[in-house]
Amino acid sequence: MPTLKDREVGIFFWAEPDAQAALKAVKQCGVVSGQLAIDGTVVLNEATAQAWREALAAEDFHVCTVFAAYTGEDYADIPTVERTVGFIPRDTRAEREVRTKEVIEFAASLGVKSFGCHVGYIPHDKSHPDFVGVRDMVRRIADFAATHGMTYCLETGQEPADQLLEFFKDVDRPNVKINFDPANMILYGSGEPIAAFRLLREHVISVHGKDGDWPDKSKPGSLGCERLLGEGSVDIPKFMAALKETGYTGPICVESGVHGEANRWEVLSRAVGILNSLR
Ligand code: MG
């Protein structure tokens, strides 16, 4: 395993069929660690796990978190996110629980210590059947992750920090943690990211390096727009200063959807450079 620094800058990347080629491409951006995302189409079996284990060893690459995304999720706008993302949709809740456990087992077989995903929009009313259903599912998944010695990270964005904190208390599981995404707070209009980070700080074990602008208030239900790192409303230098000031030493992984396939690696490399200059 490579030696990692405090606030090690890595990349959030999606699993591709050729594990070693994927890692080589990521490493070209100047990183030795990152977060591996598994979408709903990735076939998870022993052959897949073995290929990733061998590639990680060959490339001396560290995965700090395995993320899951689910077939049918759509981030077009807020009503669509509410309808399709995470554990909220009732029709897919049971199948996503099965899939989540498969992703956790896959992550554990790679020796990864953390799993993460978007839970989706959690109802505010604690007696709402979807609140109860999702809270109980989060508990079951956290307990399953714990049997593998893993944490379960909730990704921020879809609710204000105080509501997420309240949900934490309701879930009441010691291995449930937070992957803090400063841009998501802005994109979903959920609150100023640095204040949110400070409020959630004690639970944060990983961070996304992402930037964006607030939603257009004249278009209710719209999401904000993601920007190149350093060009959005997060205020990346101030955010990085807040990480240091609060003693955060965990990973910071560049997550970017602002690029075409052609300039993908250039965009990611530039973002890695910016974060490394500020870490
Ligand atoms: Mg994120």
Image: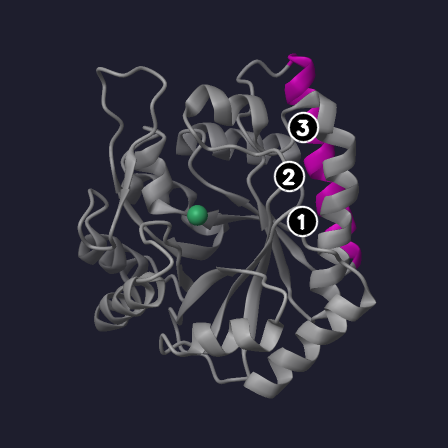
| Residue drawn at the location 39% of the way across and 73% of the way down | 6
Q: Position of residue 84 (x, y in %)?
A: 58, 27
Which badge, 1 or 3, is on the more N-terminal residue?
Answer: 1
- Mark 3 or 2, nearer chain start: 2
Query: Label 1, label 3: how many angstroms apart (C-alpha)?
Result: 23 Å
SS of the residue under disc 2? loop
How packed is label 2: few (under 14 Cα within 10 Å), some, or many (20 or more)? few
Q: Quadrant of the C terminus?
A: bottom left
On residue 71, which mark appears?
Answer: 2
Is disc 3 in contact with disc 2, using a CB cutoff of under 8 Å? no
On screen, residue 140 versus residue 207, left or right, reads: right
Marks 3 and 2, how far apart at CA? 18 Å
Q: Are marks 1 and 3 in contact (CB under 8 Å)?
A: no
Contact? badges 1 and 2 (CB < 8 Å)? yes
- Name the amino acid, label 3: Val
137 falls in the magenta region: yes
Cβ of mark 2 under 8 A from ligand 1? no
- Residue depicted at 57% across the width and 34% down the height: 73
Measure the C-alpha gap from mark 1 to mark 2. Answer: 7 Å
Residue 50 rendering spot, x and y as whole percentages: 75, 74
Q: Residue at x 67, y 29 (%)?
A: 135
In-image side of 255 versus 133 (left or right) = left
Q: Which mark is residue 134?
A: 3
Q: How is the image coloured?
A: one colour
Q: What residue would you read off at disc 1?
A: 41
Q: Which residues are magenta?
A: 127-147
* Relative vertical location of residue 248 with respect to residue 190 in this rendering, above or below: below
In the foreground, 126 or 55 = 55
Q: Is residue 19 left or right of residue 43?
A: left
Q: Residue 64: image x %, image y %?
A: 55, 66
- Mark 3 vs mark 2, foreground winner is 2
